Image (cartoon, grey):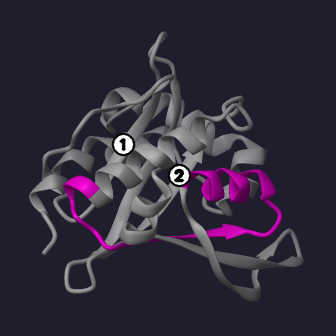
Amino acid sequence: MINSVALTDKPTLIGDRIRLVPLTLRHAEPMWRSTMDPETRRLTGTVREFTLDDVETWCAGRCEQDNRLDLAVEDLASGAFLGELALIELDERAQSASFRIALAPGAPGRGYGTEAARLMLRYAFEEVRLHRVQLEVFEYNPRAVRAYEKAGFQHEGRSRQALVWEGERFDVLHMAALRPEWRAEGC
């Protein structure tokens, strides 16, 4: 049985170089700036344009959500916003959820995504007691694929030509981490 209270608690998770904290209004402005970055938009497949008001409204309501966990990624030393991540689409019967992450410009390629994913998986498996956490990543983002592999996700398949970005078709890769495998790997 999962511990759904763990999603309503909105924890702070501390790593070696980062901390994951509840996503709140104070993260809205740097998050909004991230949504305008062309490379961030490409890596996340974001086509919608967001206003600062849109993002402020979104961030202000995250702590009230009891069926998902939205956290900001912050630099442990400086407190700088490095991105945001979430456990979403919770299925209590299947003991599963989906994972998503978007790092801010300048944060990718520095190991923050791997560390954040590991912290979230540990929380998902040990506190929420999920059995499975899955994600989707675009084939043109090999850096994210490597980060997910290092965190404990394994490849499960692909949806061929499922994404159209700037008129070109790309595959969507499916990855997942399972609690028994994650424990066995010592992540």
- Over which residues does the magenta segment extend? 126-151
Q: Name the residue under label 2.
A: 101
Q: Mark 1 points at which residue?
A: 71
Question: Is residue 61 shown to the viewer in this render?
Answer: no
| Residue 30 as seen in the image, left or right of residue 28 | right
x, y percentage for residue 133?
42, 69
Q: Which residue is drawn at 48% across and 29% down?
A: 29
At label 1, the amino acid type is Leu
Q: Does the magenta stretch include residue 143?
A: yes
At label 2, the amino acid type is Ile
Q: Of callouts 2 and 1, which one flags the residue occurring earlier in the amino acid sequence?
A: 1
Q: Residue at x 60, y 70 (%)?
A: 154
x, y percentage for residue 81?
50, 26
Q: Residue at x 22, y 64 (%)?
A: 129
Q: Which of 90 and 50 is in front in this view?
A: 90
Label 1 sits on a secondary structure element that is strand
